[in-house]
Image: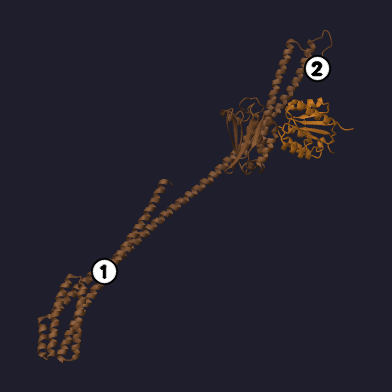
């Protein structure tokens, strides 16, 4: 029996977080969503107080990451996730306003699994998130390495 | 150093040179004159000595003649007679020579006259003596000798001769002094002259050294100023680049961060729209109870009177909000694209400009045909520059030219090029609607447009083109009148070098 996947959403804009959550739910995804509005809290949750990531051992995680955070850049978080032996297998979806090609390239190089630009047009935004939700409903996520 | 001082210095040097030349000339002339004079003086000294010698020689001959005559008188020896005759024969030539030698001196001439007279008398006596001896009358001859001695002819001769010698000696002293003086004068003139020349030369050398020093100082100052200027220019350039980069970063961050709240505004406005729909549907469902017939289909809003008005106002307000957000999003995207272009690194390569423009023209052929426009491309100079930037520049300008033709009239767009001093100058001219001169500056500003707003556009193209042209190290300008067409002129360096702009990216 596979473990239910927890969606970790790191997004500083509460409005965006609400819109994303609402649209994920609309696509029929009912997994637990844990939200963080800054990088420090998210890092604490992901890596634990000792920073080893042991705290997430055995949990199946899917990470939704915004790049522009008040206290650090999402790229740093992405890098640390992909360098951590417990977390590196967890899929990371970068969901941000930036559509700079350099930044996109950088994220994929660091191991991001999906990069999505938030369109201002709400139709497109809602569509993108719903499709992401559909993707979430079929994706197989491994538990964090033991 | 002031120009006045420079002028004064050069005048001084010319004056010095002239003075040196003058001194040299004076010295040379003086020396020639004095040397000649000294030679003359020595000649005269020599002449005096010669004259004195001649007097002595004459006296000697007379003495010889006298003593030989006496010897002959005593011994009747033929040898004495021959001696006497030889001496007598020498007397007249000697006297003549003396006359010639002393002819220049009136005093001596008088003495010579006296001397000649005395000698003539003496010679007469000699002849008589010899006659007497020849006739064998020695007593008479002896008497004649005695008489000659007593009448003082000999003494007269001696006296006149000695006075002449004295005169010559006086002349000798005088002339010697003269000669010495001339020589001393010549020597001192030469000495003083040489001294003066040396002095002038020293002053000249000092002046030359002083101006050389002044020139070196000026050169050093110039070099310093130049180096300083370069540093200042470098600093300013660095400051400007820094400022430019800051603006780029600022624009990027601002436009980027503006997007984030826009997503929320748009998102929740849409949510609100949906909510509004739900609310009005419910109001419709509550107020409009169908008395007969089927209930309204699900999702359909049935409202009446003020409720319908409310719903319409609600939709209108949301519509304005959404269209404004859409516009704002486009503007932000434009700024983002511009700043992104500003950060893009240029890759210079050799570009066949005509080929590049022909390619642009062929992609715009459809629009051109629609606008009944003909595009003529003249031979163009090739460039080494960034291909993408050039494509964007020319396609924007040609696109504008097609877009703003006069409606109804066939369009004519010409692209010409030439080179001048390392720059290529391109002209894109049309016979379109033209631009009012008061708008010539405005059209290059971001989000600003001119003329009738009947064509779609954001007011970005020309701002973008000008930014690109500037980054390529060129300039651009427009000349246009309303209704007569426009000419955009672009000046670009033929070879764009990466060092001037890319270094700071």
Residue at 77 percent across and 16 percent down: it is B279
Can residue B428 be seen in the rendering of this structure?
yes
Q: Which mark is residue B454?
A: none
- Measured from the top left, where is residue B190 in percent x and y? 33, 63
Give the colour in which the image draws chain A.
Answer: orange
Q: Which mark is residue B41?
A: 1
Q: Quadrant of residue A114?
A: top right
- Measured from the top left, where is residue B28 in percent x and y? 33, 62
Q: Which residue is mark 2?
A: B299
> CB of mark 1 within 8 Å of CB of mark 2?
no
Front-most of residues B242 and B11: B11
Q: Residue furthest top?
A: B291
- Measured from the top left, where is residue B3 in percent x and y? 42, 46
Q: Quadrant of the C terminus of chain B?
A: top right
The colouring scheme, among rainbow, by chain, secondary structure or one colour, is: by chain
Front-most of residues A48 and B455: B455
């Amino acid at each position: 029996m596979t473990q239910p996947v927890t969606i970790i959403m790191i997004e500083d804009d509460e409005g965006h977080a609400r819109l994303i959550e609402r649209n994920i739910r609309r696509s029929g995804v009912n997994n637990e969503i844990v939200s963080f509005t800054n990088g420090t809290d998210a890092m604490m949750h992901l890596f634990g107080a000792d920073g080893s990531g042991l705290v997430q051992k055995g949990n199946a995680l899917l990470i939704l990451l915004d790049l522009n955070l008040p206290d650090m850049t999402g790229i740093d978080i992405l890098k640390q996730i992909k360098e951590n032996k417990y977390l590196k297998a967890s899929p990371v979806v970068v969901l941000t306003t930036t559509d700079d090609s350099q930044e996109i390239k950088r994220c994929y190089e660091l191991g991001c699994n999906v990069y999505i630009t938030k369109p201002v047009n709400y139709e497109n935004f809602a569509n993108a998130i719903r499709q992401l939700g559909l993707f979430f409903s079929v994706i197989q996520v491994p538990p964090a390495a033991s | 150093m002031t120009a006045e001082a420079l002028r004064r210095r050069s005048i001084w040097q010319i004056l010095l040179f002239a003075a040196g030349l003058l001194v040299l000339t004076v010295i040379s002339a003086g020396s020639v004159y004095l040397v000649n004079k000294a030679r003359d003086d020595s000649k005269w000294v020599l002449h005096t000595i010669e004259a004195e010698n001649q007097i002595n020689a004459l006296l000697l001959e007379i003495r010889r003649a006298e003593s030989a005559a006496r010897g002959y008188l005593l011994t009747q020896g033929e040898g004495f007679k021959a001696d006497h005759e030889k001496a007598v024969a020498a007397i007249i030539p000697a006297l003549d020579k003396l006359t010639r030698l002393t002819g220049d001196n009136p005093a001596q001439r008088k003495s010579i006259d006296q001397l000649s007279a005395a000698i003539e008398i003496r010679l007469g006596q000699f002849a008589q003596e010899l006659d007497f001896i020849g006739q064998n009358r020695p007593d008479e001859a002896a008497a004649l000798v005695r008489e000659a001695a007593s009448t003082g002819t000999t003494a007269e001769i001696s006296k006149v001769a000695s006075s002449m010698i004295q005169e010559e000696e006086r002349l000798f002293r005088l002339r010697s002094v003269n000669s010495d003086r001339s020589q001393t004068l010549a020597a001192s003139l030469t000495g003083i002259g040489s001294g003066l020349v040396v002095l002038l030369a020293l002053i000249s050398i000092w002046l030359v050294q002083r101006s050389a020093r002044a020139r070196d100082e000026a050169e050093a100052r110039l070099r310093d100023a130049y180096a300083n200027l370069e540093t200042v220019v470098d600093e300013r350039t660095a400051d400007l680049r820094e400022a430019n980069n800051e603006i780029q970063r600022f624009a990027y961050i601002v436009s980027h961060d503006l997007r984030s709240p826009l997503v929320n505004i748009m998102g929740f406005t849409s949510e609100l729209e949906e909510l509004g729909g739900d609310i009005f549907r419910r109001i419709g469902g509550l107020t409009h109870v169908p008395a007969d017939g089927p209930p309204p289909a699900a999702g359909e809003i049935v409202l009446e009177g003020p409720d319908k008005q409310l719903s319409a106002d609600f939709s209108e307000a949301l519509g304005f909000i959404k269209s404004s957000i859409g516009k704002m999003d486009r503007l932000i995207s434009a700024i983002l694209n511009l700043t992104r272009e500003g950060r893009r690194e240029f890759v210079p390569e050799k570009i066949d400009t005509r080929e590049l423009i022909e390619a642009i023209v062929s992609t715009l052929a459809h629009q051109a045909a629609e606008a009944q426009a003909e595009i003529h491309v003249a031979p163009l100079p090739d460039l080494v520059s960034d291909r993408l930037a050039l494509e964007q520049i020319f396609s924007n300008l040609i696109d504008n030219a097609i877009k703003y033709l006069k409606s109804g009239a066939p369009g004519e767009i010409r692209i010409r090029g030439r080179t001048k001093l390392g720059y290529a100058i391109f002209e894109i001219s049309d016979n379109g609607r033209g631009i009012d001169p008061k708008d010539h500056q405005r059209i290059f500003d971001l989000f600003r447009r001119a003329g009738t707003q009947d064509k779609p556009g954001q007011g970005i193209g020309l701002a973008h083109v000008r930014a690109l042209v500037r980054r390529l190290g060129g300039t651009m300008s427009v000349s246009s009148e309303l209704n007569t067409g426009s000419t955009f002129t672009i000046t670009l360096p033929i070879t764009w070098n990466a060092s001037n702009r890319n270094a700071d990216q």
